[in-house]
Amino acid sequence: MKSGPVVNAVKFFFTIVMAISCISVSAQKNKFERSKDVGILFGTSYYLGEINPYEHFGTRLKSGGGISFRNNFNRRWTLKTSVLYHVIDARDSDSEDPWIRNRNLSFRNQIIEGSLQGELNFFNYQLGNRKFPFSPYLFGGLAYYRMRPMANYRGTWYELQPLGTEGQGTEFGEEQYKTTMFSVPFGVGIKTNLYAIFGLSIEWGVRKTWTDYIDDISGKYMDPELLRDYNGELAARLADRSIRQEITTVDGSSNGGLQRGDPGRNDFYFFSMISLNVRFDRKATTCWEHE
């Protein structure tokens, strides 16, 4: 029996927790290497999926941000929790592919993510300590996120998941896709000290998902008349916004039955962030040089 994505994600989460727990125990041997800091994050996000299949930073970039908390067990290993809010915006009209441009779909997706991540510094690093001022790092962990794919129609934004634009929720389509799910974050970054208890980190991170609906596009066009009967006029209008219809019926009147997306490949989303970090577990009078 194959394990589902949630089971795999939970296994991955507990693996990370166990590894961090072992590191925490070993870190007790040197209390001077332990530290804690909070971060204020700012950056942008994008995705890879049907509208933007290959190009990194290839969507309309929007600003976003969040907060983080780091528990640095020693100068190499860190456990970080964070909460992020970002908006992904992508449009077929920006593509160089004629087929994608003709499909003429677009979306905006508000993503809120909470995550638990382990970080491994390449060099010894400690915020506020001039002896250990800089290090690249790797990170990985588990995240839980909520998404809201939306489309603009005549000046108003509509949530797409309840509409079932590919016939979700009808006898002709799949079940409605979930809007809250697990993802696996991983990536690289650089940390550096600025002044006293202040530091800066820059990171780029991938989120592996188990959904193909970040953009509300995955399978085939449903017959527009059936979609209109089952899910309403708005669903039918937002499902097919093609500039030119592809000939699939005798009279060439609809795209029903043709591919709308690629169901064989799940979507990824990405964060590129800058964080101002503040160490808070030492008083200003602490003599850092003894560490």
Image: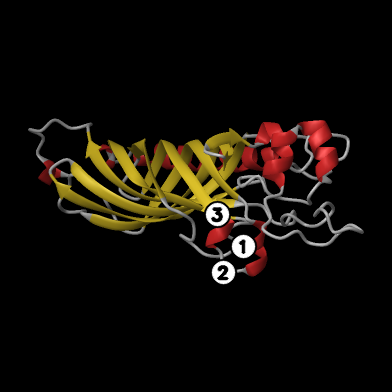
Which residue, given by chain and number where applicable, does mark 2 sit on? 96
Quadrant of the snapshot with the N terminus = top right
Quarter occupied by residue 234: top right
- Count of labels shown? 3
User: Of the residues shown, which amino acid type is indicated by label 1?
Assistant: Arg
Graded by Cα atoms within 10 Å as few (under 14), some (14 to 19) or many (20 or more), the crowding at tag 2 reads few
Which residue, given by chain and number where applicable, does mark 1 sit on? 101
Quadrant of the snapshot with the C terminus = top left
Graded by Cα atoms within 10 Å as few (under 14), some (14 to 19) or many (20 or more), the crowding at tag 1 reads some
Label 3 secondary element: strand
Q: Are marks 1 and 2 in contact (CB under 8 Å)?
A: yes
The structure residue drawn at horizontal position 30% and vertical position 38%, both measured from the top left corner, is 40
Q: Name the N-terminal-most of marks 1 and 3.
A: 3
Residue 28 sits above or below residue 50 on the image: above
Closer to the camera in the image, 108 or 242: 242
Q: Could you tell me how far apart the alpha carbons at marks 1 and 2 are, in whole angstroms? A: 7 Å
Label 1 secondary element: helix
The structure residue drawn at horizontal position 88% and vertical position 35%, both measured from the top left corner, is 171
Graded by Cα atoms within 10 Å as few (under 14), some (14 to 19) or many (20 or more), the crowding at tag 3 reads some
Question: Residue 113: horizontal and vertical position, in percent?
Answer: 49, 36
Examine the rendering and report whether any part of residue 17 can be seen.
Answer: no
